[in-house]
Image (tube, rainbow, N blue to C red):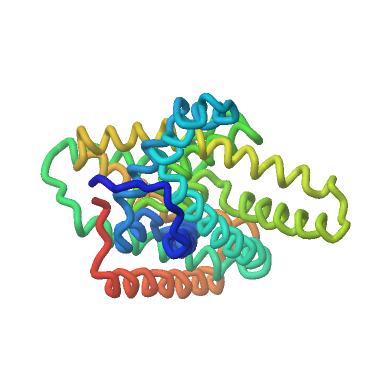
């Protein structure tokens, strides 16, 4: 679908894009709920994909060279092609929602891990069920794709398949993969972070960075900004690389082998169901009481997801 781009800044459109970003960011900050699905439901998914795929290294360089008077016309055209007057307020809205939710998650992960991760388990399990309803598994290749997706997620969640490197490498990789997932309907970026074991850590680092910056404005120490700021910068850098690489790979796979790719992606969600339970196991013994509370919160998470599915008329990874 084509969108008519204009260089006229419409304040109402900016506010609408910001509100879209708030909704999309809130969805992506919660595992089991996809920002891409929100984009579909609110009717801007096509514009989002067009803008993201228009973001290329070549156009970015053209914009950066715009400081030269003779190149300003080309830079202006590149900005319009990338639809930044839509992407920027959308991104700011997403960041606003993610920061707010990350602060809540960071707090609850310490004070109420059973409730938080039990709820997430229910969200993820219910989203897998909801998405599987819209898929048809009719061939051996579909079965193989489903088993591969679920198996890979289970192996990663159980630490049997380990990520290459550590520290900054994993953070960069998490940013690349999670941001790519955020633009796909049905796939939650935060779910990928849970699967990679980075969700709680990154939520805490983002929250710490925001608080450190706020303290700095009030006369706090610049040193407090460095560590969480480095983590956030690595994640953002990975996200930018992911948008111009991994996202395109996934889109190409969807174009060529759509049903197999969708089954693989949804199976990743199904295989990720046990991932939040590892966070509970780190702080609580699996007693009958812990299992009962976890199950109760999981049921609540599933009910919330199915209620949302009912209200919006069903989730569809297409």
Number of marks in the image? 0
- Please state if 287 lies on the left or on the right of 39 as rendered: right
- Please state if 293 lies on the left or on the right of 267 as rendered: right
In the image, what residue occupies the spot 57% across and 60% down?
A: 96
Residue extending farthest left: 138
Task: Specify whether residue 30 is in view.
Answer: no
- Please state if 241 lies on the left or on the right of 185 as rendered: right
- Measured as percent of width and height from the top left, residue 270 is found at 35, 52
User: Could you say which is closer to the camera, residue 128 or residue 202?
Assistant: 202
In the image, what residue occupies the spot 35% across and 48% down?
A: 184
- Measured as percent of width and height from the top left, residue 16 is found at 43, 64
- Please state if 165 lies on the left or on the right of 50 as rendered: right
In the image, what residue occupies the spot 46% across and 45% down?
A: 84
- Measured as percent of width and height from the top left, residue 83 is found at 41, 44
In the image, what residue occupies the spot 52% across and 43% down?
A: 196
Q: Quadrant of residue 208?
A: bottom right
- Measured as percent of width and height from the top left, residue 120 is found at 47, 63
User: Could you say which is closer to the camera, residue 61 or residue 113?
Assistant: 61
Q: Quadrant of residue 168?
A: top right
Task: Specify whether residue 138 is in view.
Answer: yes
């Amino acid at each position: 679908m084509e969108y008519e781009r204009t260089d006229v800044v419409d304040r109402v459109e900016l506010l609408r894009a910001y509100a879209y970003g708030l909704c999309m960011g809130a969805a992506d900050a919660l595992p089991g709920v996809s920002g891409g699905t929100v984009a579909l439901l609110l009717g801007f998914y096509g514009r989002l994909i067009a803008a993201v795929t228009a973001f290329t290294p070549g156009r970015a360089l053209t914009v950066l060279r715009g400081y030269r008077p003779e190149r300003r016309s080309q830079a202006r055209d590149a900005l319009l092609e990338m639809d930044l007057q839509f992407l920027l307020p959308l991104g700011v809205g997403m960041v606003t929602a993610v920061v707010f939710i990350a602060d809540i998650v960071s707090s609850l992960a310490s004070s109420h891990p059973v409730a938080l991760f039990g709820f997430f388990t229910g969200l993820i399990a219910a989203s897998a069920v909801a998405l599987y309803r819209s898929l048809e598994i009719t061939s051996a290749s579909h079965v193989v794709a489903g088993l591969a997706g679920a198996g890979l997620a289970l192996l990663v969640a159980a630490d049997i398949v380990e990520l290459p490197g550590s520290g900054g490498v994993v953070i960069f990789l998490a940013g690349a993969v999670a941001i790519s997932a955020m633009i796909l309907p049905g796939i939650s970026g935060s779910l990928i972070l849970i699967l990679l074991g980075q969700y709680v850590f990154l939520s805490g680092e983002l929250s710490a960075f925001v608080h450190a910056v706020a303290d700095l404005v009030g006369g706090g120490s610049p040193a407090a900004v460095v560590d969480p700021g480095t983590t956030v910068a690595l994640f953002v850098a990975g996200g930018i690389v992911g948008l111009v690489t991994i996202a395109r790979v996934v889109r190409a796979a969807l174009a060529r082998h759509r049903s197999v790719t969708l089954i693989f992606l949804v199976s990743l969600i199904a295989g990720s169901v046990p991932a939040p339970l590892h966070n509970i196991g780190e702080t609580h013994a699996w007693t009958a009481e812990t299992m009962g509370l976890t199950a109760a919160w999981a049921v609540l998470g599933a009910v919330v997801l199915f209620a949302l599915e009912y209200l919006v008329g069903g989730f569809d990874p297409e």
